Amino acid sequence: MKVSCRRKSLKLDIPFTISRGTTVERQVLIAEIEHEGVIGYGEASPSAYYGDSIEAAEKAIRGTEALLAGPEIGRDPYALELIASGLGREFPLSPSGRAAVEMAAHDIAGKLAGLPLYRLLGLAGMKPPLTSYTVAVKDVDLIRGDLDRLRSFPILKVKLGFGREENLLDFLSGETDAVIRADVNEGWDAGTAIEKMARYQEKYAIEFFEQPLPRADIEGYKMLMAETGSTVFVDESVTSREDVFRWAGLAHGVNLKLMKSGGIREVLAMVTAARAAGLKVMLGCMVETSVGISAAAQISPLADFCDLDGNLLISNDPFRGVRGAGGLLDLGELPGLGVRPSC
Ligand code: MG
């Protein structure tokens, strides 16, 4: 198996603001693994927040060739568990780099079998939940011209935690009929959260609040569970199956992402862990091309909620694949991840 990768700078349609800052473009890596003429595509969208970087991801992707050719895997494209565990052992510092290689390996396996990945994984007949569309702006004026697009999505996920929130929530609840979910990205303390969650729940019927408090604020989450009637998800707090069990009883659900957890196999294990721990499952994403989004979409029938819109937020997606237009994730019948280069 030959492994290569290239960098790509993704341009955001609208500057993307969360409680920790604003992004106008994002660097990702597109990985290609070639096996007997079949090309598998993968993507790394690394996040410094999780200790990852474009350099670490590139090192992981480029360093994979020896692992795939080694005696354990022996270039067998169906050795998906061994590929995942080998990547975890060799490249612990780059979950997104591992995710890219694993995606490409799953893409090859699906293409060789002539099956879309969801069918290969036994998920035929199950429907993915609708995906939300993310609104991540400081200023309402940035989205006034984008109302047609916003109105085409039945669910909006609104980033909060950086002030002027109620302007934005007033605007969205007045101008659209969408269900509103809130993602605070650790932007509140427990006292603020208890007050705001009650008020916003009452005024805007927020479906759930994601990561209202800092990721390690266990005592704060205990307070939210005891003192609010709102549904709480954690995202930044959870990157592994062990984390999922740690958060049982401290939140109602977990947001799982390929890029922070190292790929499809770990996220599948996390889904099982979450079910055993009585937690709801959301499948989320970073700003990504259609490669990463399609990989996540292929396992999305296992989720209760989806936030797979990273490819809808960029203007230069180099691939075509699963897109959540109108919130609907159509997995299609193309083999593997269901992606093709767009030019
Ligand atoms: Mg989040």
Image (cartoon, rainbow, N blue to C red):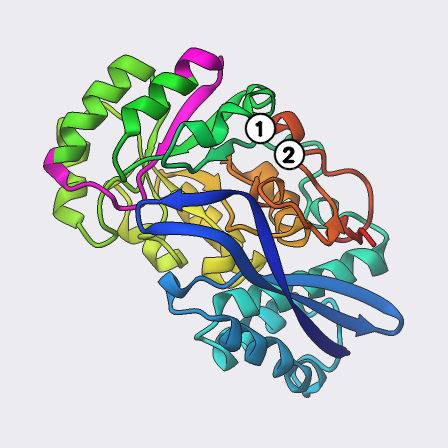
Cβ of mark 2 under 8 A from ligand 1? no
Cβ of mark 1 under 8 A from ligand 1? no
Q: Compared to 319, does 4 lie above or below?
A: below
Q: Pointers 2 and 1 in contact (CB under 8 A)?
A: yes
Does dot 2 land on a helix, a strand or a loop?
Answer: loop
User: Which quadrant would the N terminus be assigned to in this image?
Assistant: bottom right
User: Which mark lies nearer to you, 2 or 1?
Assistant: 2
Viewer-side residue, 277 vs 332: 332
Q: On residue 130, which mark appears?
A: 1
Does dot 1 land on a helix, a strand or a loop?
Answer: loop
User: Which quadrant would the C terminus be assigned to in this image?
Assistant: bottom right
Q: Looking at the image, in which quadrant does ligand 1 appear?
A: top left
- Which residue does the numbered mark 2 point to in the structure image? 324
Residue at image coords 68%, 68%: 31
Viewer-side residue, 28 vs 168: 168
- Amino acid under label 1? Leu
State which tag comes first along the sequence, 2 or 1.
1
Magenta range = 173-191
Residue at image coords 69%, 50%: 317
- In the image: residue 89, left or right of residue 18: right
On the question of residue 304 being in view, the answer is no
Residue at image coords 58%, 76%: 58
Q: Residues within 10 Å of mark 1 (few under 14, many from 20)?
A: many
Q: Position of residue 270 (x, y in %)?
A: 45, 52
- In the image: residue 154, left or right of residue 204: right
- In the image: residue 302, left or right of residue 118: left
Q: CA distance from mark 2 to mark 1?
A: 8 Å
